[in-house]
Amino acid sequence: MAIASINPTTGETLKTFTALSAAQIEEKLQLAAVTFRAYRQTPFTERARMMTRAAEILETEKQAFGETMTTEMGKPIKAAISEAEKCAWVCRYYAENAPQHLTDQIVETNAQKSYVHFQPLGPVLAVMPWNFPFWQVFRFAAPALMAGNVGLLKHASNVPQCALAIEDIFTRAGFPKGAFQTLLIGSDAVEAILNDRRVAAATLTGSEPAGRSVAAAAGKQIKKTVLELGGSDPFIVMPSANLEEAVTTAVKARTINNGQSCIAAKRFIVAADIYDDFVKRFVSEMRALKIGDPMEESTDIGPLATPQIVNDLHEQVKKAVASGARVLTGGKKIDRPGNFFEPTVLVDIDLVAPVSCEEIFGPVAMLFRVSNIDEAIHVANATPFGLGSAAWTNDAGEQQRFIEELEAGSVFINGMVASDPRLPFGGVKHSGYGRELAEFGIREFTNIKTVWINGITQTDTE
Ligand code: NAP
């Protein structure tokens, strides 16, 4: 895939980039290794000062960063600006909390003193997707750098200007040269980097095939990986739920980021008693969404990131229809320049058809009718993925069952799945492993070292 910024609203190629040569990659890996040796010694206060400065840059220039995101991948400008603000939040969160997350933990044993000590691992390669082109990178980089690691970013090939802007933010924030580097490379260059002894670990946010490939290559070298992969999140609505609120949240949860979010609700599983009412309201709200230029503040849905995504989405809709599904609204590409697809609602989907549990990356919702909570849980779990899940019910017993029985990295009751720096984020099953955010995320790329000491002299303990 060429490394290029192509505006998905117009199809215009804005800028193309030449991939780094082997010699240029070597130079950057060497710089990362050398920088790490010094950077790991910097005190938390110094790292926090630079991370806070990164947050300030994000806040001050959020409009410009938002425009770069929208121009490269098509998300509505309001959402893009909020994304820059959220990146500032994660920078501040780790600037303030990293010291306590990584402080030594004393454990009473038969030693005179024993404790758990957290140390950075080294240069970490981050392979990142285009859909939240700033957020995905910052939620890796803020904890990784605060822990004393250095970062190497291989961003998606369609968002090179976002990738370069992020490197520039860390440079301007005062991080030493080599603490965070963007590598403009294709996915074919990733394996050699993972094989390089100077690279300590890797994290990948992206599709299941990309995750398998990176995990296999890193596995051969016995290197730690964190994988944040796809999802087919269920959104369950039971009779006791506030239907109006559930429908409005459901539409938002399906269409946020033009429907291209890993934690977007993708399968709506609705109790039979309220199903017809839910469908009527849901279709009406999907039809009312404003589709258009993502640079306009009033736009709800902009273009999908690439023509390939539009084609893949259309194929999935056709497959669903071929296996018996009905299209209640939408169903095809919009006849205008750019990668626009109609907000679409599918019903009567055959649960045996593979498309019923695949990840659908675009504004296409699948609605399922269920007769009781057992069936709701069964349908919700009938997917290889396990990222997020949402359940709407005001019945305490039902809430507890969803919390216990949904196979997912998170359960949101009467709400919409969202990431938050204070809470861990990640999946189970084919959605990946490891966690980002909170104290769990910052510890992923550390050596959790056991320290056991006997023979402490008086002077040592003073
Ligand atoms: P993608 O095609 O897997 O690409 C993600 C990144 O992986 C890109 O940098 C890509 O580089 C690289 N890549 C692809 N194949 C690779 C390989 N074989 N070896 C090494 N690197 C490889 O995914 P995407 O289309 O950008 O993003 C959408 C997917 O990401 C969806 O499945 C979505 O659910 C998932 N996602 C998950 C989360 C989460 O937190 N769980 C968050 C956001 C997105 P190129 O661009 O150069 O191909």
Image (spheres, rainbow, N blue to C red):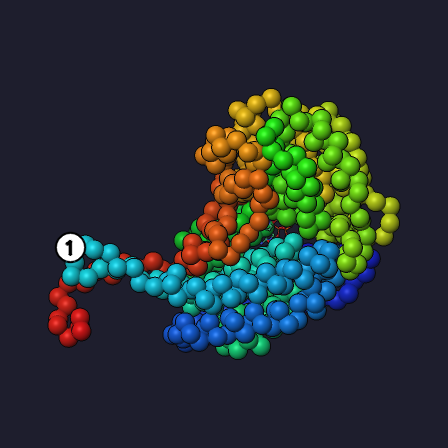
Of residues 73 and 397, the one drawn nearer to the viewer in this rendering: 397
- Picture coordinates of residue 415 (x, y %)? 58, 43
| Residue at 79% over, 58% down | 296
Task: Classify mark 1: residues with Cα within 10 Å, few (<14), some (14-19) or many (20+).
Answer: few
Q: Is residue 250 visible?
A: no
Amino acid tagged 1: Asn
- In the current view of this chain or complex, which residue is farthest to the top? 371
- The residue sitting at 53% across, 78% down in the picture is 174
Location of residue 164 in the rendering, given as x and y in whole percent from the top left corner: 63, 69
> Residue 118 vs residue 442: left or right?
left
Q: Residue at x 64, y 23 (%)?
A: 272
Q: From the top left corner, tell me how far across and down residue 294 is, in percent.
A: 77, 56
User: In which quarter of the view is residue 75 placed?
Assistant: bottom right
Picture coordinates of residue 201, whole percent (x, y): 45, 58
| Location of the C terminus (image quadrant) | bottom left
Count of marks, rendered view: 1
Please say if 420 is above or below 64. above
Secondary structure, mark 1, is loop
Quadrant the N terminus occupies: bottom right
Residue 40 visible in the snapshot: yes
Name the residue nearer the viewer: 328 or 25.
328
Q: Is residue 78 above or below residue 270?
A: below
Vertical side of 422 occupied by 272: above or below: above
Q: Is mark 1 within 8 Å of ligand 1?
A: no
Q: Which residue is mark 1?
A: 110
Which one is nearer the viewer's eye here, 30 or 373? 373
Q: Quadrant of residue 111?
A: bottom left
